[in-house]
Image (cartoon, rainbow, N blue to C red):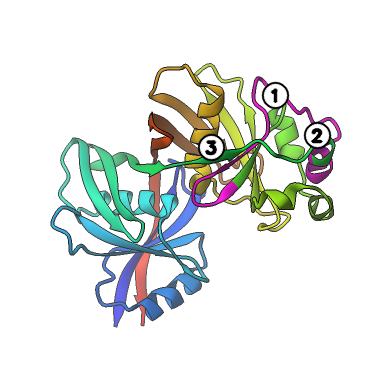
Amino acid sequence: MSCDFYTVDVFTAERFEGAQIAVIPDASALNEEKMQKMAAEFNLWRTVFILPSEQADAAKQLRIFNAKKEFQFGGHATLAAIYTLAKQELIEVNEGLNSFLLKENYGDVACQVTMKNGEPIFNQFMTQAKPEFDRFTPTEDELSDILSLTSYHFSVKGFTPMLASTHLPYLFVPVDNFASLSAAQFNYKAWSESSAPATFANALFLFSVSNSNDGLHFHCRLVGPAFGLHEDPPIGAAIPAFAGYLNQFLIGQNLPLSFVAERGAFVGRKSILHVELLSNNEGEISVNIGGEAVLVSEGKVYL
């Protein structure tokens, strides 16, 4: 028995950049145990398994794993699935903008793909969240020690540190420029001896404001006790919380609020995420997250 697979680099138009995702386009013959074993064999950031949907209004159903567990939702995996379904003509798509639903364990996800000359050129999905915020954060001196930044500035271009949580809590920390963002090194000892563990955040989301003239543009990076010293994890899961965080400082601006989040520029595998904060209704935000993707490999897995 065998099944086809693809690997896709997402949030990039260049191969060997962005985040690597494995896609199984027809997982109808696989049980959960086989899915988990295959994800462990690929050992990529995520592996997404595409199944027929039991809902008439959903094009397909997705199940998402990494080497250790299954996830309720995955932004990078969803983008890879949208791209693969369109590129391989596994759903009906036409030139221009196409809209459809994908079912995930988390719930239904509204998706869009833009086709040009038969190729998917932009993929996006909408997610909703109700962020919670807490202004209790480590002190400036603690953050300097945690990030190994001797010249850390507590207030950067109107932004200040804040805890924001959607499905996971993130400690958002602005830094003064891209050089500081690149130089930051997580110090576990300083973290453990600070007030940071009391925030229950499992990661620090560092960002600097870009000098780009193309509108709001942020350089972003995740560090923290959940990651290895040299890891540069994808930031997609943190984007809804980041959108909510930004809205706390940009209140009064008309929605939708569009911005670009870039990750990985200083270590390779650069990702570009296009984000729109569509609405904020009684604290529940709707966020569009989109980007490009590119096919890297295809083949068969023998079971």
Instruction: Tell me which residue sits at (73%, 55%) in the image.
Output: 229
Is 198 situated above or below 123? below
Q: Earlier in the sequence, mark 2 or mark 3?
A: 2
Magenta stretch secondary structure, dominant? loop
- Which residues fall within the magenta stretch? 143-169
Residue drawn 26% across the image and 61% down it: 61
User: What type is the residue that disc 3 sits on?
Assistant: Phe
Residue bearing mark 3: 242
Badge 3 element? helix
Q: How far is mark 2 from mark 3, CA to CA?
A: 21 Å
Residue 1, image quadrant: bottom left
Q: Which residue is mark 1?
A: 156
Q: Residue 238: image x %, image y %?
A: 53, 45
Query: What SS does tag 1 mark?
Result: loop
- Assign a secondary structure to mark 2: helix
**Of residues 161 and 109, which is closer to you in this image?**
161
Q: Residue at x 69, y 51 (%)?
A: 224
Please name the amino acid that badge 2 sits on: Glu
Q: Which residue is mark 2?
A: 140
Q: Quadrant of residue 139?
A: top right
Of label 2 and label 1, which has the lower sequence position? 2
**Is residue 17 visible to us here?**
no
